[in-house]
Amino acid sequence: ALRILSDGPLKGLKALVTSGPTYEAIDPVRFIGNRSSGKQGHAIALALAAAGAEVTLVAGPTALADPTGCKTVRIESAAEMLAAVQKALPADIFVAAAAVADWRPAAEAAQKMKKRDGGEPPRIDLATNPDILATIAAPGPKRPRLVIGFAAETEKVVEYATAKRQKKNSDWILANDVSAETGTFGGSDNKVHLITADGAEEWPRLAKTDLAQRLVARIAATLKDKSK
Ligand code: CTP
Ligand code: CA
C-alpha cells in the first residue's frame, strides 16, 4: 500500500482527477454506460495524494472504494461530472481519466418506458455531451498548469492520440489501446504511449497502480522544472 507523504514532491499543489464511466439516463431504470472500471483513474488519484497533493476525485459509478487521502465526489452523468469538476477548480493539475459518454439520450423519460404488445421498439434520440477535458484545457485564467488526458483507441493509437492532444489543448495525452484483446477495460494493467509536445514515448505494459506512480513521478519532475 502507498504511504501518504504529507511532505511529498507535490506538497502544496491541488490536483483534480476524473475517473470511471458516466451513466446517461434513458428512463428511471435504464441508462447508456460503458466498460470503464475506474481502476486507472482511482490509482492516479491515490498516487497523487501519496505524493502530497491535495486531491479531488470526481468519480462516475464504479465498484471501487473511495481512495485514501482524496476528497471523492460521486456523480453519474457527464453533465454532473462537468459541474463537479468546475466546482472543484482551481487546480494545478487536471487528469481526465474518466470514460465520459460521448452522447446522452436527448430527453430522459419521466416514467419507465413500457413495451407495447406488437409495437415497434422505441427510438432513442441522442444529444452530444460536453467535452470536459477540452473545456478545462481551454486557455483562460482558471486553466490548470498541467492538463493530462487519455485517448482510448482501437487503431492508429499514436496518430489519433496526437491529434486529440492538439484538438483538446491538453498538455499530455496517455494513449491506450482498448481493443478487446488487450483486456485494458476492466483489467489490472495498461499499456500506453505518453504524448507530449515533444512527441510520443512508449511505456512498457504496467500494472495500473505502477503506471499511476510513474505518471506522478513525471508530473512532479515537470512541475519542479517549470517552477525554476
Ligand atoms: N473526455 C471528456 N469529456 C468527454 C469525452 C472525453 O473529458 N465528453 C476526455 C476523456 O476523459 C479522455 C479524453 O477526453 O481524457 C479522450 O477521450 P476519448 O473518448 O478517447 O476521445 P473523444 O474525444 O471522446 O473521441 P472519440 O471517442 O470519438 O475517439
Ligand atoms: Ca469518447
Image: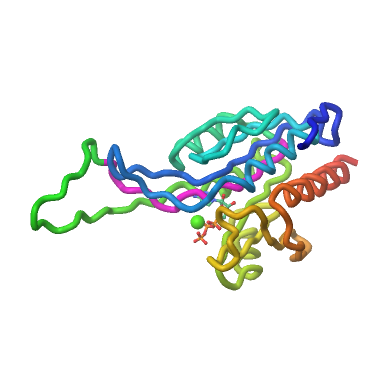
Q: Which residues are magenta?
A: 92-108
Q: With 129 as the anchor, is 116 left or right in this view? A: left
Q: Nearer the viewer, residue 167 or 202?
A: 202
Q: Nearer the viewer, residue 210 or 127?
A: 210
Residue at the limit of the structure toward the bottom, as seen here: 156
Residue beneath the point at 22% across and 40% down:
112
Q: Quadrant of residue 141?
A: top right
Tally the marks: 0
Residue beneath the point at 65% across and 52% down:
170
Q: Quadrant of residue 201?
A: bottom right
Q: Is residue 119 magenta?
A: no
Q: Position of residue 133 (x, y in %)?
A: 58, 47
Q: Position of residue 55 (x, y in %)?
A: 68, 32
Residue at the limit of the structure toward the right, as seen here: 228
Q: Position of residue 37 (x, y in %)?
A: 55, 48
Can you say whether 86 is above or below 123 in the image? Answer: above
Q: Nearer the viewer, residue 40 or 156?
A: 40
Can you say whether 45 is above or below 149 in the image? Answer: above
In the picture, the quarter occupied by the C terminus is top right
Can you say whether 227 is above or below 123 in the image? Answer: above
> How are the colours assigned in the image?
rainbow
Q: Position of residue 169 (x, y in %)?
A: 64, 53
Can you say whether 221 is above or below 202 in the image? Answer: above
Q: With 186 as the anchor, is 123 left or right in this view? A: left
Residue beneath the point at 75% across and 60% down:
197
Q: Nearer the viewer, residue 31 or 140?
A: 31
Q: Is residue 105 magenta?
A: yes
Q: With 168 as the anchor, is 50 left or right in this view? A: right
Q: Quadrant of residue 1?
A: top right
